[in-house]
Amino acid sequence: MAQTEVILPKMGESVAEATITTWLKNVGDTVEAEEAIVEIATDKVDSEVPSPVGGTILKLLVQEGEVAQVGQAIAIIGAAGESASITPHSSRETPELIAAHAVEQTVVVAQETVAPTANVDFSASDRFYSPLVKSIAKEEGIQITELDAISGSGKNGRVTKKDILEFVENRGQGAAAPSHSPTPQAIEKAPVAETIQVKPAASATGDTEIIQMDRMRKLIADHMVKSKSTSAHVTSFVEADVTNVVNWRNKVKGSFEKRENEKLTFTPIFIEVITRAIKDFPMINISIEGDTIIRKKNINIGMAAALPSGNLIVPVIRNTDRLNLLGITKAVNDLANRARTNKLLPDEIQGGTYTVSNVGSFGNVMGTPIINQPQVAIMAVGAIIKKPAVIETPQGDTIGIRHMMFLSHSYDHRVVDGALGGMFVRRVADYLEQWDVNREI
């Protein structure tokens, strides 16, 4: 069997690289075709890369913490039982790998030229830093002088994710030993009397525990804070009678699962009626760029999903206005299942135009969701609860036991006024209350 290179796959139009976070297999291990061998991370999502063939891992070409380009070889697989090379993968410097590093540096320099960093002046150093390391440095407020002082454990002394996170954890407990002397150019560009604000390191006592945020939690935190500082949040609430929906689902879910091998949850129903309401009120399906309003022709609904780690991710169902309820159901189940197993692609969590969050799945009756930028609105659907309610009939009003739920609609008051925001959530409630109990699916 000829040796096979494991190539970092394409993960979407906007993703050019990924960080190798964890190798699931070591040199010499046997793998099956399509078996996951490595976990990778982009700035959007974590995922796994499967082996293209069965065989034996001969070499790992990229270390944990290093950045690989899409299309780059990250491992070599040989025939089952073939002896693995003893040569450390970190010493493999083929012309192709050297060229890949050169392209990576060129891309980074070009990005910095187009959008220079406001907080950290990376141009003050001739040392290469990966986009992930730069992102962490900006999030943590690490100055270039501090970054240059970190000893890198990666190839050619490169600072890895592990290195910078260890620096953040130990920050304030002592300066890191410089890995190399600063160049004259770096000294010349460095501020003469710069004051570095060093955050004191948190210390644990007997009744406390220090927990370091993981990468995804940091991204979520940053995204939420930016959303609150960007949009003028307003939330409107409507209580909807969803008795027809509940009775209909109870009637058809068994036969539906038997026929389609798919579970019918409430989420596809919510997405369908929200899509109908967006078609009625297209100015909800917009985004803002400066003082310009961008109205989206496609309706792409994001659904907030909780991961086993406790983090949150929002996969996107595209063109929901072109799907029937069966198509929406299959898309919801597929994305939810792959979200729980870290199988989502970066493109599958981008491009949303409106988001729904099912806070009722946690037993919450309502919430005030934060807008998923750059969208301008988001809806939270609460728990469905039986309660006494007034029922209007031609013969007069009566009181009966009904299935009720709250809809919470948060919107950006810069472009969505109370009338539009309120009418939209009311229309969603109307569609739920008018659900056809004789509908076929």
Image (cartoon, rainbow, N blue to C red):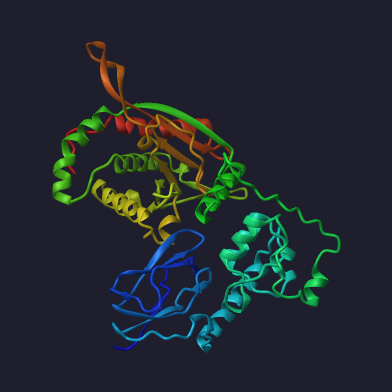
Which quadrant is home to the C terminus? top left
Is residue 318 something one can see in this rendering? no
Count of numbered badges drawn on the protein: 0
Residue at 38%, 84% in the rendered image: 84
Is residue 179 something one can see in this rendering? yes
Horizontal side of 201 relative to 104 (left or right) equals right
Q: Based on the displayed image, in which of its 4 quarters is residue 385 positioned? A: top left
**Looking at the image, which is closer to me, 202 or 117?**
202
Relative height, residue 121 to residue 266 (above, below): below
**Looking at the image, which is closer to me, 14 or 138?**
138
Relative height, residue 271 to residue 92 (above, below): above
Horizontal side of 124 relative to 51 (left or right) equals right
Whole-percent x, y for residue 12 in the image: 43, 66
Horizontal side of 74 relative to 343 (left or right) equals right
Q: Based on the displayed image, in which of its 4 quarters is residue 278 positioned? A: top left
Relative height, residue 73 to residue 387 (above, below): below
Residue at 34%, 30% in the rendered image: 430
Whole-percent x, y for residue 346 in the image: 44, 61
Whole-percent x, y for residue 236 in the image: 48, 30
Residue at 43%, 38% in the rendered image: 379
Whole-percent x, y for residue 357 in the image: 41, 41
**Looking at the image, which is closer to me, 43 or 297?**
43
Return the residue found at the far front.
Answer: 206
Which quadrant is home to the N terminus? bottom left
Residue at 32%, 86% in the rendered image: 82
Return the residue found at the far top.
Answer: 396
Return the residue found at the far right.
Answer: 192
Relative height, residue 59 to residue 268 (above, below): below
